[in-house]
Amino acid sequence: MPEPVAAPTDDDGRPLPPAVQAVEVQRCRAQGGPPADDTDAIAAEVPVALSFNGLSHAVMMATPADLPAMALGFALSEGLIASAAQCYEIEVTAGTLGCQVELRIAQQAFAGLKEHRRAMEGRTGCGLCGVESLAALDLAPAPLPPSPPVEVAAVLRAMAQLAAHQPINAQTGGCHAAGWALPDGTLQFAMEDVGRHNALDKLIGRLAQARQLGTPGFVVMSSRASYELVRKCARVGIATLATVSAPSSLAVRIASEAGITLYGFCRGERAVRYAGAPALSGGRGPA
């Protein structure tokens, strides 16, 4: 049995909604017979409101765990702050409707935020909510400097370790994960959320908290590769992204333009390289 996931608290010690919740269910069979009453564990999804210097900015549906890391990662990956040093304080408050996360950021960053502010509700499913025109899309991050390619064997080694770093998913089967791996494929840690974008923001935030952003390594994810995941990696200088499922056409395009190595269908002994530096076999080649 997996270890229970600890219940988080806000900055005043009040309990946040649990990341895993129990619900009553009926288990049914195609062969017939009466349904069996039971309980099941499901991943929590609650509204999380982000505010910057008192200004409400976004509401996301997220799993209420590692919220300070998610908020910091969101601010970095969306270009709201230029570095973690521009975030002075993060405060989490539990409420009856969800969770409030207040970030206190540098005045220069706040001025830029107010200029470019747009509504972004529901980031679990859509990265373009609130954009008013095609001309307002920000789809072309600056190209990253060249970096040594990651061996395919290392990518597959890290992906194989991902499930062992997913305690919430082990209980519920309903969470995505974003993991940070060293260049040799050693998976250091992973962050979980019902939304793949939130999981990556949590990972970016944790890397920033540990002052590991910009150090050698790569990201593996339990999801498909959307354009937004690639864009977030580009904005914080992560040069390699590997996912267990397929990429979208826009994800491949942005990865190519930004100089990101993008792998999809990383399963077992095979992976598909869609963009980036030539793969090194390391004893095992891509599909």
Image (tube, rainbow, N blue to C red):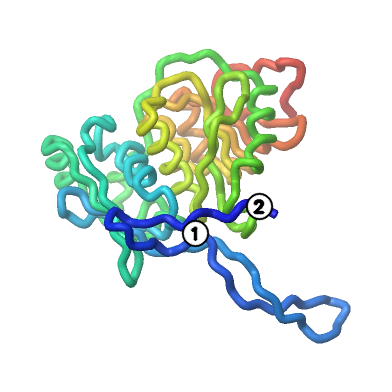
Identity of the residue drawn at 65% across and 41% down:
164
- Looking at the image, how many numbered discs can be counted on the residues? 2
Judging by the rendered image, the residue that carries numbered circle 1 is 19
SS type, badge 1: loop
Q: Position of residue 209 (x, y in %)?
A: 36, 33
Q: Amino acid at mark 2?
A: Pro
Task: Please indicate whether residue 117 sits to the left or right of residue 247 in the image.
Answer: left
Task: Please indicate whether residue 57 sits to the left or right of residue 125 in the image.
Answer: left
Judging by the rendered image, the residue that carries numbered circle 2 is 2
Q: Nearer the viewer, residue 234 or 162?
A: 162
Residue 60 in which image quadrant: bottom left
Q: Nearer the viewer, residue 55 or 65?
A: 65
Quadrant location, the C terminus: top right
Q: Nearer the viewer, residue 205 or 264?
A: 205
Q: Position of residue 91 (x, y in %)?
A: 26, 50
Q: Which class describes the residues within 10 Å of circle 1: few (<14), some (14-19), or many (20+)?
A: many
Residue at the right extreme of this rendering: 31
Q: Does residue 151 lie above or below 125 as drawn? A: above
Residue 224 in which image quadrant: top right
